[in-house]
Image: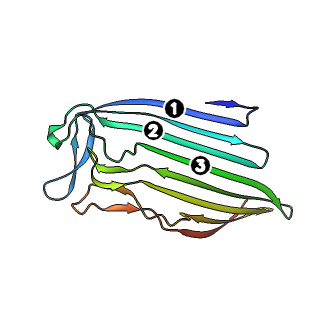
Amino acid sequence: KLTLLSNRLQVNAAVYRIDWQDIPVAVLGTCGSGTLANASESRSQGFELEAIYQFNQNFRVSFGGAYTNAELTEDASGIGAVSGDRLPSSPEYSVNLGLQYEFELAGHASYVGGDYAYVNEFFNRVGETGVRVGDYGQLNMSAGVIFNDFNIELFVHNLTGEDALTYADVIVFDDRAYQLRPRTIGLNVGYQF
């Protein structure tokens, strides 16, 4: 963690390595339902980076990213997997970008902003098998104004109407999955006590 440029730039970073022994993974059982099995040894390693830059009093930009290499480091013959197979539900990388502009509107503090996030593809079973998930970007926008103790915000989540799977479980044979929420437009009203 560090700050630069007279505290206008904040940077947070992490590097990690996790060695697992007998890692439990979900596999499809013989009766068509999911079960947990030990998958010998594996390693998850990568880095995460987050940066926030305050251009001026009104305008702020944030950026984040992560890279993950999560794979078996030993054959797991009990589940039909070999060393080097990618672990399930582990996207290789993801990135996000956010912008926010603050200003006054008729004497009231106001803001407009947006954020975009991308998640790389991943699979719900060991070795990049099963259901393909991820590989989507989501764009969100919001604008708000503060009237004394009230905060009113108009938002749009998933502005582009991206249609993608965000997670797939290994529960039953039909590979049930979760889908990205469709475009959602709403209004939040808050009161500060």
Q: Considering depth in this image, is 147 or 1 the residue closer to the camera? A: 1
Query: Residue 98: percent from the left, percent from the top?
Result: 62, 50
Q: Amino acid at mark 1?
A: Ala
Mark 1 vs 2: CB contact within 8 A: no
Q: Is residue 108 above or below residue 85?
A: below
Q: Is residue 164 above or below residue 12?
A: below
Tell me the residue that label 2 is attached to. 67
- Residue drawn at x 32%, y 50% is 123
Tell me the residue that label 3 is attached to. 97
- Residue 113 located left or right of residue 119: right
Tell me the residue that label 1 is attached to. 14
Closer to the camera: disc 1 or disc 2? 2
- CA gap between label 1 and label 3 equals 18 Å
| Secondary structure beneath label 1 | strand
Q: Earlier in the sequence, mark 2 or mark 3?
A: 2
- Residue 164 located left or right of residue 183: left
Number of marks in the rendered image: 3
Query: Residue 135: percent from the left, percent from the top?
Result: 42, 53
